[in-house]
Image (tube, rainbow, N blue to C red):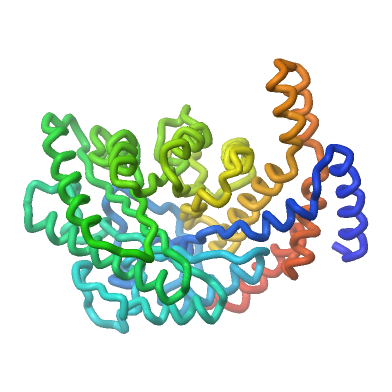
Amino acid sequence: MKQDRIIAAYEAAKERYADLGIDTEKALKALKDISLSIHCWQTDDVIGFENPDGQLSGGIQTTGNYPGKARNIDEVRQDMEKVISLVGGHHRLSLHAVYGDFKGKKVDRNEIEPEHFQSWIDWAKEHGMKLDFNSTSFSHPKSGDLTLAHRDKAIRDFWIEHTIRSRKIADEMGRQLGSKACHNLWIHDGSKDITVDRYYYRSLLKDSLDKIFSVRCPNVKDAVECKLFGMGLESFTVGSHEFYMCYAMKNNIMSTLDMGHFHPTEETYDKISALLLFSPEIMLHVSRPVRWDSDHVVILNDSVQMLAQEIVWADALSRVNIGLDYFDASINRIGAYVIGIRATQKAFLQALLSPIGQLREYEASGRNFERLALLEEAKGLPWNDVFNYFCLTENVPVAEDYIADIEQYEKDITSKR
């Protein structure tokens, strides 16, 4: 798009929003300050560097075989650098423990050290990014159906040690980069069929978590992530929503809300205000569950829009850590990143540009027709002209221009892998 047309459209949009008492410049500044935690695992379909030929196991699955996935640490970084060149704002990178710089050596999960991620810290410094971290309980000979809730103490101890080491790595990331790293703990532990000893397994998980979090990591924001069920583990999940919500509240750590980890009729946005009344901060994994936790690429749908609205309208941007979590192997992986990141940014911009002051007045006075009418009219406001202007000022492709850029990258780079 021509620069003068983008600016002219923005100026017209700015006037339209001003009619409703909305400051587009303020909204743009707020959008620029929203730092998304971009997940590294879309680059290579959640394989990591322990065993590049390995298969996923432990309640998760990636579908598709689009050519050009990253095969090593250099290609993951190359792809991430391309992604951040195509989106505005300043963001974080979220790493799983299997993405360490192991330099070809066999390093088991209970042996990982900060030194295995020092090159990531150096890379982040070079690119002006911060880092977040995740322990990795799946795709390992000792993962099976149970890890931190396993009946075998030796297996529990293995995963306790792994998770403690993961938190220490996150702590070093936070220390060196001057920004606390979110460490997210998700395990797949569960059962395919009827389980009669649920209390016992959950008591084991609680004991494991107590040991893990007894280790002080001052540069870490700890989070625990619930799930409804995992693939092949449909009947019982040890770390349910109720379990982790209670544990997080009691121990003053964050709950992670993944948009794909609840019943299909549940909306994640409705949980945010409830948790924020009792917890200083929470963490989100923004995803698109087409049927359930299918981890499709995020698009600008109602669920994402309502999620952004709830956060902005609760004035909670500073209390919500926003991460992305999806992995689609059926399409261009760089394109998947850019679509998802931009969709999330668009949702937050829409929320920042909403006439919330007038809507609150209508609601407080019981003028429900007026509230609904304004909500509907707001859907047609020229927010996309404001987003195009944001991209222009951030020196990234405007509108659909990024498509050609990604196609060229595929032709030059990923098609040759």
Q: Position of residue 330 (x, y in %)?
A: 51, 55
Seen at 42% across and 76% down, the residue is: 176
Q: Quadrant of residue 173?
A: bottom left
In the rendered view, tell whether residue 101 sits above or below residue 230. below
Q: Position of residue 201 (x, y in %)?
A: 15, 40
Q: Is residue 141 visible?
A: no
Q: Position of residue 113 (x, y in %)?
A: 27, 75
Q: Give left or right: position of 264 versus 85.
A: left
Q: Nearer the viewer, residue 282 or 38?
A: 282
Total labels drawn: 0
In the rendered view, tell whether residue 195 sits above or below residue 58. above
In the rendered view, tell whether residue 98 sits above or below residue 159. below
Seen at 65% across and 52% down, the residue is: 345
Seen at 48% across and 79% down, the residue is: 123
Q: Nearer the viewer, residue 401 or 330?
A: 401
Seen at 59% across and 53% down, the residue is: 340
Q: Is residue 348 visible?
A: yes
Q: Give left or right: position of 246 versus 319.
A: left
Quadrant of the rendering where the N terminus is positioned: bottom right
Q: Position of residue 65 (x, y in %)?
A: 45, 59
Q: Give left or right: position of 251 versus 283.
A: left
Q: Give left or right: position of 15 versus 142.
A: right
